[in-house]
Image (cartoon, coloured by chain):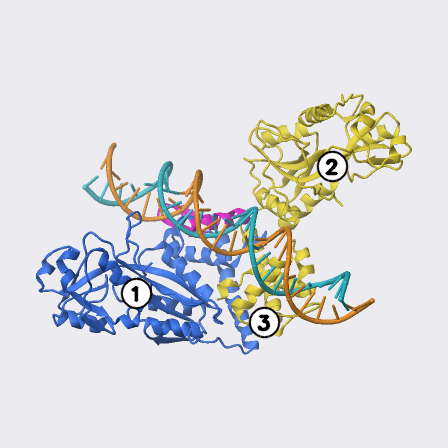
Chain colours: A blue, B yellow, C cyan, D orange
Amino acid sequence: MSDLVELKKLKNLIAVAEAGNISVAAKRLYLSQPSLSIQIKDLEDVMQVPLLVRDHKGVRATPAAEILITGGRELLRMRDEMIGMARALHRVTFVPMRLGFSSFVDHALYEMVCSIHTSLFPSCEIKPKSGDPVDLLLMLERGEIDAALVTLPASGAGLKAYPFTQSRLVVCMKSNDPLAKLKEITPADFGSKLTIFRDPRQHPQAHDRLIEMLDVVGITGDVASTNKTPHDLQWMVESGTGYALIREGSELQPGLVTRPVAGVTWTVDSALIVAKSTSQRTMPHLVREMRKRLRLQSSLPQSKKPVRSVRPRIGDRILPLFG
Amino acid sequence: MSDLVELKKLKNLIAVAEAGNISVAAKRLYLSQPSLSIQIKDLEDVMQVPLLVRDHKGVRATPAAEILITGGRELLRMRDEMIGMARALHRVTFVPMRLGFSSFVDHALYEMVCSIHTSLFPSCEIKPKSGDPVDLLLMLERGEIDAALVTLPASGAGLKAYPFTQSRLVVCMKSNDPLAKLKEITPADFGSKLTIFRDPRQHPQAHDRLIEMLDVVGITGDVASTNKTPHDLQWMVESGTGYALIREGSELQPGLVTRPVAGVTWTVDSALIVAKSTSQRTMPHLVREMRKRLRLQSSLPQSKKPVRSVRPRIGDRILPLFG
DNA sequence: CTGTCCAATACTTTCTGACTATGGCCGTTT
DNA sequence: AAACGGCCATAGTCAGAAAGTATTGGACAG
C-alpha cells in the first residue's frame, strides 16, 4: 500500500491543503484541476481514508490528511537534506550552465529559463552570454556554451531546437505617423518604407527567411538600416528612417506605436537550442519543465514586464514562417 | 532536482545495493534488468554523482549511495509509520477481502493472490470461501464476495475477468497403463476411455466448452464419473475407471502419470473474477500487482461469446506451470 | 579463443498520468 | 426564480514515461 504513496503526491496534497482549494493549487503546481483532483482521490483510495472535506467553496484537510501533511513536509525536508549530504560527500559542484541569448529574444523568456533552472538546480550557477545567433550557434557546436535562446530558424551540426514561444510580428512606427491612425495596416501600406532591420549578419538564416516572407506579399524589403539591438532598431524608427517589424508585446520607447498587419500572420519563434552532446545534464530537465509550464497557460507568468505578446489562437491558420 | 528522486527509486537503489548485482535485484523486484539499470542511471544523472561502481561481477555502492541508502531506509520507514498513523486516526479498519476459489484452481495461484494481497495491504484480512464456480459467480453478482478464482469461461452481469495463468491439459492415467509407455498420445488413443470429469454442475460453461472441444477431435466425452474435487478425480483414475484431463503440473497421487496430447493444444485459463461494483478498493491494486508478476495480459473478451478455455497456442511458447 | 556473466544500449510496447470538455452542486446576483 | 459563477467530479483521449525484448560490449575463467 505504502508504495503507492509517493513524495510527489504528498507534495501535491500539501499544496492543496495550503491553498484550501484544488483549482488554485493546480494553477500553482502548473497542473490542471482534474489531474490534481484525481491524485487526491487516488491517495484517498489507497489509504481508504478521506483526506479532504469538500464543500462549495473549496476543501479542508481532515485530521488524517493533517498527519500526511506534517509527515510529508518532514519527508520532503529529509529528502533534500539527504541529497545534499550525498552530493557534498562527493564534493560535487555543478558545472555552471552556460546560457547564450540573443538580444532579440524576449527578456521574459530568458528570465523564465533562468528561474526554472535555478528552481530545479539551486546550486547550479548560470553563466549568461549575450551574443549574435550566428556566433551562439557556433559556440554551441564547439561546446563553449550549453544552450542558447535564439529565434528560429536555427540549425547546426548536432544541435536540437526546442521552440518555446511564438509571437506575432507587428509594424513599429512613430505615434504621429499617418498610418498610426489605422487599427490595422496592410503590407501595401508600409511596404516601401520597411527599411529598418536587424543586422543580417547576426542571423543570416532568419534574415533570409524574413526577406523571403516579405517577398510573398510583394515587399522588396529594402534593407537601409541594420541594427545590432532592438533598442537601436527602435531608435532608428524614432528618427524617422522608416518602419520596422518587431515582436508584438515588446517594450516600446516613448513616441512609438505598433500596428498589426492585416491579411497575414507573421510570427517569430523563440527556441532553446541545445547541443545534443552537451555535458550539462540539467538540460533535459530544464526543457521538460519549460514545456510543462508553457503547455498549460498560454500566457507567460507575469514578470514585472507586461508581456502582452499575443499568441495565435488554436484553429487559426498560421503562415508557416521561420519554421 | 530533489523532485526527481522518488521513494520508488530509492527503494530500488536499496535493493540493488543489497543484491550487489543489478540483474539479481531486478528479479527480486519483478523488473527487467535494463529497467533497473536505467533507473539507477537516472538517479546518477539527476544527482550528478556516481552511485555504483560497476565491475564484471556486479556493482558496489559508492559513499554517496550509502547516504541515499541509509536515508532512503529511514524515509521508507517514516512513510509507513505516517500512513499507519493517519489510518489509525480515522480508526479505519479494512473491510476484509472475501475471496472465493474453486478447488480446481491451482493452489499455488490462490496462495500467490493471498500473499500479494497481504503484502500490499498487510492489515486487510482475507476471508477465503471455497465453492463451485457457478455458486461463486452468483455470490459475486450478489456482492457476497469480492473476487473469485475460477477457470474460464466465466461470465456474469457486471463481472470482469482477469486471466492470470494458462496451463496445458494433459491426460491422466495409471502409471502401469499401456499408453503410459508413449511420450505423447493422440485423441484417438484415449478418446473412448475419457470418462472421468469434474461435476458439470460445478461449472456448466466450462463443461460445455470442454465437450465442444472434445467433439472437434471426434471424442464424445462420455461422462461416466463426475467429481467434486481434483482429488476425487485422481482417485477415480487410480481405481481404473478411465482417463481424465487435468491441468499439467498438477500434483499427482502416487501411481498416476500424465501424458500430453499430440496434435492439439488444449489449455485452461485461471482467472480472477471481480465484480465491477465491488466496494473492495484493494482489487485494482491486487490485479495490477498480479499482472506485473505474471506478465500476462488480460485482454480477453468476456462478452456473450464465452472465452474459449481451449484455444490455439499463441506463438509456440507455453507458459511454465506453477512451480 | 571461447563461453559465461553482467551491465549498457537500441528499439518497441504498454500504461500511467495529464489534458480538454462537460456535468452537477451550491451559493450569489439580477 | 432564473441565471450566473465558482468549484469539484467524471469521461474520454492522447503523449510521454516506464517497462519489456533483443542485442551488444567488456571482462574474466577455462
Near mark 3 (Cα within 10 A), the count class, few <14, some 14-19 or many ≥20, is: some
Q: Name the amino acid type tagged 1.
A: Ala
In terms of image quadrants, where is residue A159?
A: bottom left
Q: Is residue A166 magenta?
A: no
Nearer the N terminus, badge 2 or badge 3? 3
Viewer-side residue, B316 vs A238: B316
Q: Which residue is mark 2?
A: B168
Q: Are marks 1 and 2 in contact (CB under 8 Å)?
A: no
Is the C terminus of chain A in the top left, top right, bottom left or bottom right quadrant? Answer: bottom left
Q: Say left or right for A74 vs B192.
A: left
In this view, the mark in front (1 or 3): 1
Q: How many angstroms separate mark 1 from mark 3 (CA)?
A: 42 Å
Q: Which residue is mark 1?
A: A206
Residue A29 in view of the camera: no
Viewer-side residue, B208 vs A4: B208
Q: Are marks 2 and 3 in contact (CB under 8 Å)?
A: no
Near mark 2 (Cα within 10 A), the count class, few <14, some 14-19 or many ≥20, is: many
Percent across and percent down for residue B80 are 59, 57
Q: Say left or right for B96 vs A227.
A: right
Give the residue displayed 78% in from the left and 21% down from the top.
B222
Q: Which residue is mark 3?
A: B50
Q: Say left or right for B60 vs B225.
A: left
Percent across and percent down for residue A311 are 28, 56
- Which secondary structure lies at badge 3? loop
Residues in magenta? A35-61
Task: Tell me: residue B81, above or below residue A199.
Answer: above
